[in-house]
Image (cartoon, grey):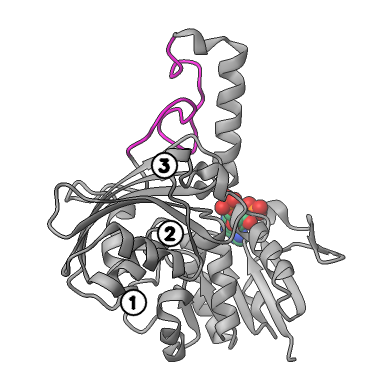
Amino acid sequence: MKAYHIAVVGATGAVGQELLRVLERRNFPVASLRAISSARSAGKSIRFRDHSIPSEELADSSFDKIEIVFFSAGGEISRKYVPVACQADAIAIDNSSVFRMEPHVPLVIPEINAEDVRGHRGLIANPNCTTAIALMALYPLHRAFGVRRTFAASYQAVSGSGGRAINELTQQVKDAAQESLVSGSRTDRQATPRVYPHPIAFNLLPHVDSFLESGYTKEEMKMQNEGRKIMHLPQFRASVTCVRVPVYRAHSVAVSAEFERPVSVEHAREVLAKAPGLELVDEPQNNRYPMPLRVAGKDNCEVGRVRVDCAFENGLSFWVSGDQLLKGAALNAVQIAELL
Ligand code: A2P
């Protein structure tokens, strides 16, 4: 089998580290690996298989002789360096939102629109993590019943904001324990928010990504915009509220969806149980339903709490959880590379 020269931009970050583990775990044919970071982490040793690789500072020459490069170092880095990588004839798989909606850039969830990869021109975009996790359950239901529109609320883990956010939650929990803040006094005086505008420990932030004029955030509009592109469904509508929660890992989404055709819980469960990359965990009487702690570190997403929606005609409500560093980022990116 041919093996590939691979680079990971952001190799020291939360997604980058996960990418390396996924490449190892799935036995991706890697001939050589270049781990790339900023100057801050240059020289830091990165473990891959049985080797220790020094991370290199990102530069224009980073992509020489590279065949596939994964970008997970934020939008600004992608904006500047994806074109440099393409110029060097590397195929870029980009985790940022910068190129996702460009018409000639495939935006791919392999279980849904694998065939879109074929039209790539050197760049394939990896979808938004919350969108990817929600669509893993919504798309099979769409195939069965024809989705029209959805209302959803997300419960997003701090690791989606990177390594600094993980540390921020840990520090705030420690501070709170030390100062016995849990006994009822306010936490926002003592906490030291940096990544988020408010304390994330013991709190909920109805604010993920920046606000648009419409009052939605950018993150909230991704489910509609990216959902339309991925499902090839230009009329799809999604009204979403995205919430950052003090969970380390794995996002959850509560979805109510309206369909064109009549639905039943039995038929929906049958469809979901067969869907690739998804597990049905739906035994509420035994307290069994998807939760972040169940899916953290797991490739498959889980769906449960399936019920007929009482506000929509032909509506279903359900709850889906998935590891956003895996299906929402690293796993999906490696699956795209496998398609290539
Ligand atoms: P570094 O470790 O040098 O900061 P996370 O999402 O966990 O915050 O990680 C972000 C990743 O993107 C890290 O690997 C980080 O490297 C990398 N990164 C951030 N800024 C740059 C930059 N200017 N050039 C290259 N890599 C960057």
Left or right of residue 27: residue 231: left
Q: Tell me the amino acid under the disc marked 2.
A: Ile
What is the count of numbered marks? Answer: 3
- Which residues are the magenta region? 185-206
Magenta span dominant secondary structure: loop
Front residue of 243 and 82: 243
| Label 3 crowd (10 A; few <14 / some 14-19 / many >=20) | few
Q: Is mark 2 within 8 Å of ligand 1?
A: no
The N terminus sits in image quarter: bottom right
Q: Which mark is residue 155?
A: none
User: Up-down: is 120 above or below 302?
Assistant: below
Residue 69: within the magenta?
A: no
Residue matched to label 1? 102
Front residue of 310 and 169: 310
Dot 3 or dot 2, earlier in sequence: 2
Quarter of the view holding residue 273: bottom left
In front of the other: label 3 or label 2?
3
Q: Tell me the amino acid under the disc marked 1.
A: Glu
**Measuring 51% from the left and 55% from the top, which residue is drawn there?**
324
Q: Tell me the amino acid under the disc marked 3.
A: Pro
Q: Which mark is residue 133?
A: 2
Label 1, secondary structure: give it. loop
x, y percent for residue 14: 61, 52
Residue matched to label 3? 284
x, y percent for residue 82: 51, 75
Dot 1 or dot 2, earlier in sequence: 1
Q: Is mark 1 within 8 Å of ligand 1?
A: no
Dot 1 or dot 3, earlier in sequence: 1
In front of the other: label 1 or label 2?
2
Quarter of the view holding residue 163: top right
x, y percent for residue 130: 40, 55
| Label 1 crowd (10 A; few <14 / some 14-19 / many >=20) | few
